[in-house]
Amino acid sequence: MAALNNLACNCNARSGVIVSLAACSIYLFYKHIYCAHKLLKRNVYNSQTLPSSVYLVIKYLTMATCRRRAGLLYTRSGMCEVVYTVLNCRLEIGQLRRWCDAAGYGWDYPDSEYRDIPLCFPEALCQRLLLMVLCDDNFRLSPTGLIRVRQSLKTLQPIDELKKGPFTLQVRVLGYQVVDGGVEVDVFLSASSRSGQPVWESVVTLLSTDKLHKDTRPLLKEDSEKEWPDSGNVKTRVQMRVPGTAGLTCVWSFLDDLPNYLLTIPARLFGYRCWSSPSVWMLSVCLAEIEKHKGTGAIRAPIFVTAQFKEPLSVPGMVEITFWGTTPEEGLSSSQGITFQMEQHKTRLPNMTGLISSAS
């Protein structure tokens, strides 16, 4: 009789565990999958109601598996605009500190009253929106294997305006261009102040390479071998060691969300450099070094920065950052710009080149 009672108790306990697990599974599915699926059909969000990272990870992997690279797809709903907007965003000092520490500015960077928020930091705030764009059903490329080839940034007023109250973030697709070797897509990112005035804007150009076509990017090596015109100004050279964890640190600090880090693993396993590669780190470190040597006024709003990412950065290794003043050409603005580049010691070819000028 006792044995039967023990058996009944064990059965009841197992049934209770199974029921509890089933209830938890249903709750998690509802909260992180079903609700996120419904939310992703919207275009305007409050900062507290964004789709779950878990759902975005699953959808990213699904689209990466099903969609062919470098193929310009025609979506079911036609040529719908892909745009996402988040209202009432708040700047978190902890996130800014981690980002500054990873991007070459230093952990105590925000404590200085004479420094503006780093120029590339708003992109970190837009990363969730950028991920949503890549997972959108109307996005016409495979989200995996995208390589950042160009970027422009513009500040119309100091980015510190974002500290003064709730602000708005927006990410949208501007258009696609079929090029020799793949398809490029231009993605527009912006941050507006609490009064609705634009504070920061950026256009990121991503390339989806065609595996069946010879990549034309190595042609940039020939261009990189050309000498920059001599402006007569002294060039400043800074050498630094890039640790093997540079890319991982970027993903952790820039995205500020561990689930998003998982998105880089499948692409790297298959030999791809995905959209969260250290391109932003390369640009941020260059701007940080320029500010350290030329002062905060060198990168102060209104300002316009353009960058071209020519070669992937191999880590660990040594890099050299070079920057110098550029004399404006005849007919252009009279303000002097700053040209910069980063090159790896092994190749002696620029990984990235850029220009800083005053925004008009």
Image (cartoon, rainbow, N blue to C red):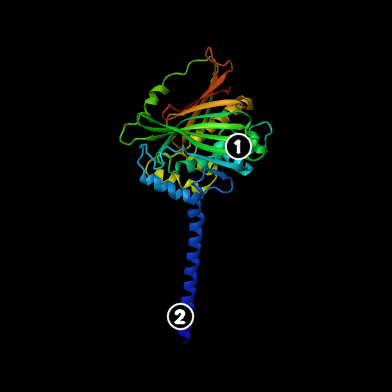
Q: Position of residue 137 (x, y in %)?
A: 43, 44
Q: As drawn, which residue projects farthest toward the front? A: 77
Question: In the picture shown, does residue 336 fall above or below 347?
Answer: above
Q: Which amino acid, by three-letter code, is at mark 1?
A: Gly
**Label 1 Cα neighbours within 10 Å, binned few <14 / some 14-19 / many ≥20:** some
Q: Which amino acid, by three-letter code, is at mark 2?
A: Leu
Which label number is shown at residue 106? 1
Given residues 41 and 200, the one toward you in this image is 41
In the image, what residue occupies the spot 59% across and 48% down?
48
What whole-number distance in Å separates the C-alpha atoms at marks 1 and 2?
63 Å
The residue under label 2 is: 7
Given residues 116 and 32, the one toward you in this image is 32
Tell me the element at label 2. Answer: helix
Q: As drawn, which residue projects farthest toward the bottom? A: 1
In the image, what residue occupies the spot 41% across and 29% down?
347
Quadrant of the rendered structure where residue 155 is?
A: top right
Question: In the picture shown, does residue 219 fall above or below 50?
Answer: above
Question: In the picture shown, does residue 260 fall above or below 210?
Answer: below
Q: Nearer the viewer, mark 1 or mark 2?
A: 2
User: Sequence-wise, which precedes: disc 1 or disc 2?
Assistant: 2
Q: As drawn, which residue projects farthest toward the left? A: 212
Q: Report the side of 163 relative to 311 (left or right).
A: right
